[in-house]
Image (cartoon, rainbow, N blue to C red):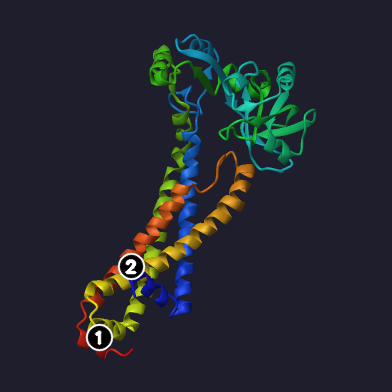
Amino acid sequence: MNLATYARRNLFRRPGRTILTMVAIAFAVLIFSILRTVVYEWNRGAEEAAKDRLAIRHKISITMWLPRKYVDEVRSTPGVKAVTWANWFGAKDPKERTPFFAGFAADQNTWFDVMDEMKLDPAQLDEWKKTPNGAILGDLLAKTLQVKVGDRLVIQSDIYPGDWEFKVVGIYQPLRKTADRNSMIFRWDYLDNDPRAAFGKDKVGWMLARIDDPGKGAEIAKRIDAKFEANDDQTSSMSEKAFQLSFMGGFSALLKAFDYVSLVMLLILGLVLANTIAMSVRERTHEYGVLRAIGFPPKHIVGFILGEAVLIALIGGVIGVGLTALLINGLFGPFAEENMSNWFPYFSTPPTVMALAMALAAALGLIAGALPAFRASRLHVTDALRRLD
């Protein structure tokens, strides 16, 4: 008899309790994996941001505008290859097929040159440049709004009053998952020339600059900001990754809460497993006394108990990882990527999270079994043999 054989044979001596413990561990691993996936994927979009793009916004806040003439100043900065700009529109669908989506006004001559992860048919791009109220939609948004190229589309805004009428002139496809497939892009000059947007006349919300050397991004950003230091409207230039992370600042508390909750789930997992092992040890005290009496040293008793605890934890962990792969990667992940791409362009539990969940399950198995194993190994043979329950 060895440690593995003993642990395996004793695993289901109390099948109901063991199975319930494994189920509890599996669900703890599943919830842990879900929470870690949310945190991982929330930051993944920023990690995948283009290395050769800078974002330029108002120094005080993204909600404040910059003068349109700044675009030409940025364009003339050494190291900058191309510049585009946009204004946030805050689009809402009056028919409520989708409550809210990303809508913004962009420069029709430069946007798709800088944002090259959005694939648009050249003929549709030419049509956009000819159509003042032309709009380009992401493929998923077009599907949700049930429109196609050539259709009339009426949209409302959180910022600008009334109904805004557009003609759908193109639908873009993502070349990388960093491209939001649920966005609407229309012409900046269409917004700028409308009386309802007069309070933001000749203003831009942010600029995106493509640079010739990603390794000099910080240096080029300083050059850009230096141009406007003496102006009333100063700029804050940063990498696209930093720009995206700035939007996540408001969610940092929520993400931190997810971290804490995932730790709580591990604590619950440990307590459930510790209770199961402690009950098993109490029931087998007499048995351990017999083992000691026939020559098994204390270290073998410790090994038997720890082996059983780790085996239960690993089986529960494997079930939990299997549920994660099925429910997250197989079902919810594809749904989220298709219908929530503005929040989660990616959503799948990476192998590293699954491996971490398994490693933590095994570690908690060792920790949960440590105290009962230590106590069992310290029992006197005569005291253990007197225990018949």
What is the CA distance from the residue labelled 2 to the residue labelled 1?
22 Å
Of residues 371 and 267, the one nearer the viewer is 371
Quickly name the residue at label 2.
368
Which quadrant of the structure image shows residue 281? bottom left
User: In this figure, which residue is indicated by the disc labeled 1?
Assistant: 384
Q: Quadrant of residue 337?
A: top right
The spot of residue 87 in percent (x, y) is: 58, 25
Instruction: Judge whether 311 appears above or below 158 on screen.
Output: below
Image mark count: 2
Left/right placement of residue 384 relative to residue 316 reads left
Vertical comparison of 38 with 367: above or below = above
Q: Amino acid at mark 2?
A: Ala
Left or right placement of residue 117 versus residue 30 in this view: right
Quadrant of res 346: top right
**Label 2 residue SS:** helix
Q: Residue at x 71, y 17 (%)?
A: 129
Q: Nearer the viewer, residue 268 or 12?
A: 12
Q: How would you rate the neighbour count of disc 1 (Cα within 10 Å): few for under 14, some for 14-19, many for 20 or more?
A: many
- Mark 2: give few (<14), some (14-19) or many (20+) Cα within 10 Å: many
Query: Which residue is at the front of the view, 164 or 329?
Result: 329
Q: Position of residue 348 (x, y in %)?
A: 54, 47
> Image quadrant for the N terminus?
bottom left
Residue type (three-letter) at the residue carrying disc 1: Ala
Residue 154 is situated, as x and y percent measured from the top left of the image, at 75, 33
| Left or right placement of residue 83 versus residue 312 in this view | right
Tags 2 and 1 in contact by the CB under 8 Å rule?
no
- Indicate which disc, 2 or 1, sits on the residue closer to the N terminus: 2
Q: Residue at x 54, y 15 (%)?
A: 82
The quadrant of the picture occupied by the C terminus is: bottom left
Q: Work out whether residue 261 can be spotted.
A: no
Q: Going by the image, does 232 lie left or right of 191?
A: left
